[in-house]
Image (tube, coloured by chain):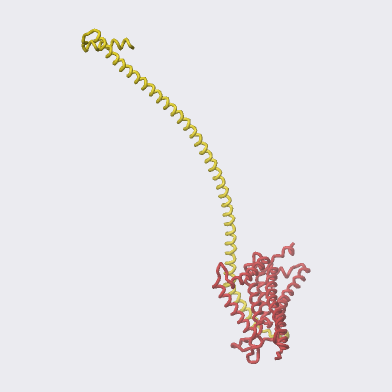
Chain colours: A yellow, B red
Amino acid sequence: MDILNQFGINPVLLAAQVVNFLILLFILKKFAYGPILKVLDERKKTIADSLKNAEEIEKKLALTEEEKEKILAKTSLEAQKILDNTKKEIEVMKEEGKHQAEAMAAQIIKKGKEEALAEMEKRQQEFMAGVAEIVAIAVEKVVGKVLTKKDKEELVAKSIRSLQ
Amino acid sequence: MEQEIVLKPEILGFFHSFPVTNTLFTSWIVMSVITIITIILAYSIKTIPGTLQSLFEIIIDTGYSTVEGLAESKSKVFFPFVMTFFFYILFSNLLGLFPGFGTITFKGAPLLRSMNSDLNMTLGLALFSAFMTHFFAIRYLGFVDYLKKWFTLNPIFLFVGILELIGEITKIVSLSFRLFGNIFAGEVVLSTVSSIFAFIVPLPFYFLEIIVGFVQAAVFMMLTLVFMVILSEKHGAEQHS
């Protein structure tokens, strides 16, 4: 094998190169390939997770937005209802107040009338008493005798009765 | 300065009876460079990568997806071998372009010489690549199926199988000589151009050599990968039926 000799092939050197390679293989596998591939894998996973999360968040956001809209619509509807109810109630209350006021006024009027009537009666009675007195005095004068108290009263009662 | 072109690596000295050539010495330097970078890398690995980590992530991720595309389920096993071929050859090729290579002499011989400009080194890699290829083939196919790849009773397929067996030897030759030839030629060109005019003129050739160094590393890696995948694949189905 002259050609091998020309190239200086030496089995020991071939073996040395193989050993070199094996050492490098071991070092690179342990310190470079393993850790880096692991990190790359982890990063891939993290990115995938993040993307998934982002999607979910977006979905949730959309859902929340929808719910918000719904709630807002519902709320405004309810508010409208409450407003309507209140208006109705106010109307009713107004009506009631009016009725009450009318009733009260009627009562007051009635009471006034009664009072006025009572007053008039009283006045009348007083007036009658006055008249009786006068009558008694006149009778005294005419009859010329002093009436006893009992006679007077009788007379007054009689005259009042005739007046009524 | 006239430099003679020698195919043989120069022997710097003997360690006991073990010859230490300048290319072997360079391979140790390459190894230590890779080891140092790797250890720095290993201790700085974080989820949020730094510059060094990003660079290696790009290379390793690209390499891994390439291996995965071809080897599929076996990629975890093939990847470290294939990637280490790439790194080893790439670093030694690029380191061979540094100043001092071929110019610093030790006992009359250049102290440093680009690793792959020595057939010993490339043949060592090619032999190991072939060995692992066949090892994986036996591991994934079983010994009997592995033998059936080459030897069948059908005379035509037997002939084809024997041709392919010779092809396996050619693979080793082609892998080792391609790498050796490219880098050795690059060395020769660079030293020749430098001896004509040492300033500026060699620059384009340096750029060329950087590309060649990368391409050869990638070629070696891809070929090893493809050989591994092809040989450990069960395509015996068409032969049986």
What quarter of the picture does the C terminus of chain B occupy?
bottom right
Q: Position of residue A67 (x, y in %)?
A: 56, 47
- Viewer-nearest residue: B190 or A24: B190
- Viewer-nearest residue: B137 or B86: B86
Q: Position of residue B47 (x, y in %)?
A: 56, 67
Q: Position of residue B15 (x, y in %)?
A: 59, 87
Q: Position of residue A43 (x, y in %)?
A: 58, 64
Q: Is residue A54 above or below residue A152?
A: below
Q: Residue at x 59, y 58 (%)?
A: A51
Q: Residue at x 56, y 75 (%)?
A: B40
Q: Residue at x 31, y 16 (%)?
A: A127
Q: Is residue A123 above or below residue B107?
A: above
Q: Quadrant of residue B46?
A: bottom right
Instruction: Count numbered badges in the picture.
Output: 0
Residue B194 shown left or right of residue A121 in the figure: right
What quarter of the picture does the N terminus of chain B occupy?
bottom right
Most extreme residue toward the top, as rendered?
A: A143
Most extreme residue toward the right, as rendered?
A: B156
Q: Is residue B81 above or below residue B194?
A: above
Residue A5: tell me if it is visible. Answer: no
Residue A86 shown left or right of residue B116 in the figure: left
Q: Quadrant of residue A154?
A: top left
Residue B178: tell me if it is visible. Answer: yes
Residue A24 shown left or right of residue A113 in the figure: right
Q: Quadrant of residue A74?
A: top right
